[in-house]
């Protein structure tokens, strides 16, 4: 028993060190404005200062977040779009906006809304997100006092809550960058074709630990992959507009084999209707990730609580 514990501890230290080395090799840039402070999170993070946002707040007043929240809720469902809801792509927008954060130099993160500029908008990882950004433009036009950073973060939060997910203690105050030069470098978002070490490198850079990596991966219960965006194809679960722990149930209860097609490596179930990405399979292959995945598979309430922290 003691040998097993020692072995697992040694492995944990080893993978952490390897992931940290890889994380530090990801290109970063020195913060352009020292007053931007961000903390990345799945549905966005809180930031408190910035010149453009400060100007808009002074001139236009504080945003009416309650009214904006209601307006987002009212337009989420659309039977003519994808699986009948814009919710999943709004969650992806919020996550990709926040997922560029680096604890090493404080750049990136949900404060900034850099996807308004070509360097970040044209990042291959953000393909298709113009749909979500354009979807929110009418609300931004009606409420110019809200920053894009806050709007995108709030939209992701409202989407998760509206689809049956946990409730978040969301706060406003994120500020937008005003110049493309302030965009974080490309390559900071997870690459779904990579392994566990890559996941750790990306998420450790944002300040997350292994348990949080697994919890955030549970958001794959929403939406689907599109070949013209990520290159991958299909949904992870059958109820792709309902937030639950079904993602973990499918990982453990279903049988996954390599999909035979002309696209990138992905996995499919026996029906051929559901899929998993290489990074998804790492959640149950990696012994440390698997411990947390099993907990969320068995306890949806625990998953909701951890996801919303």
Image (cartoon, grey):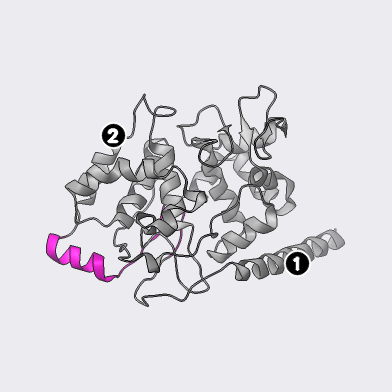
The residue at the point 29 percent across, 70 percent down is 50
Q: How many marks?
A: 2
**Relative height, residue 193 to residue 9 (above, below):** above
* Label 2 crowd bin: few (<14), some (14–19), many (20+), radius 10 Å: few
**Residue in the foreground of this view, choosing between 114 and 77:** 114
Residue 44 within the magenta-colored segment of the rendering: yes
35, 214: nearer the viewer: 35
Residue marked by disc 2: 75
| Residue at x 36%, y 25% (from the top left corner) | 80
Residues rendered magenta in the picture: 39-61
Residue 75, compared with residue 31, is above or below; it is above
Instruction: Point out which mark residue 293 bears.
Output: none
Q: Which residue is mark 1?
A: 14
Neighbours of disc 1 within 10 Å: few (<14), some (14-19), many (20+): few
Q: From the viewer's side, name the closer residue of 206 and 142.
A: 142
Location of the N terminus (image quadrant): bottom right
Q: CA distance from mark 1 to mark 2?
A: 47 Å
At a point 54% along the width and 27% down the height, the residue shown is 238
Q: Position of residue 130 (x, y in %)?
A: 38, 44
């Amino acid at each position: 028993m003691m040998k097993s514990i020692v072995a697992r501890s040694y492995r944990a230290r080893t993978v952490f060190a390897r992931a940290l080395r890889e994380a530090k090799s990801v290109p970063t840039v020195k913060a352009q404005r020292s007053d931007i402070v961000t903390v990345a999170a799945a549905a966005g993070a809180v930031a408190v200062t910035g010149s453009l946002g400060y100007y808009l707040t002074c001139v236009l007043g504080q945003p009416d977040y309650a009214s904006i929240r209601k307006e987002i809720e009212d337009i989420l469902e659309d039977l003519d779009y994808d699986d009948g809801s814009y919710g999943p792509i709004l969650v992806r927008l919020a996550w990709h906006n926040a997922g560029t954060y680096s604890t090493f130099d404080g750049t990136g993160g949900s404060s900034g809304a850099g996807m308004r500029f070509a360097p970040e908008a044209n990042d291959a990882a953000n393909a298709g997100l113009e749909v979500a950004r354009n979807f929110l433009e009418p609300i931004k036009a009606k409420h110019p006092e809200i920053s894009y950073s806050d709007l995108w973060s709030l939209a992701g939060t409202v989407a998760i809550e509206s689809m049956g997910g946990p409730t978040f203690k969301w706060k406003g105050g994120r500020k937008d960058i005003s110049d493309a030069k302030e965009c974080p470098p490309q390559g900071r978002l997870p690459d779904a074709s990579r392994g566990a070490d890559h996941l750790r490198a990306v998420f450790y850079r944002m300040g997350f630990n292994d348990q949080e990596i697994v919890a955030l991966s549970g958001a794959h219960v929403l939406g689907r992959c599109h070949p013209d965006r990520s290159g991958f194809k299909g949904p992870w679960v059958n109820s792709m507009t309902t937030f639950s722990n079904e993602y973990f149930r499918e990982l453990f209860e279903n049988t996954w084999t390599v999909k035979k097609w002309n696209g990138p490596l992905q996995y499919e179930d026996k029906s051929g209707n559901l899929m998993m990405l290489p990074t998804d399979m790492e959640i149950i292959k990696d012994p440390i990730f698997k411990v947390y995945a099993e907990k969320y598979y068995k306890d949806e309430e625990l998953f909701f609580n951890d996801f919303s922290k």
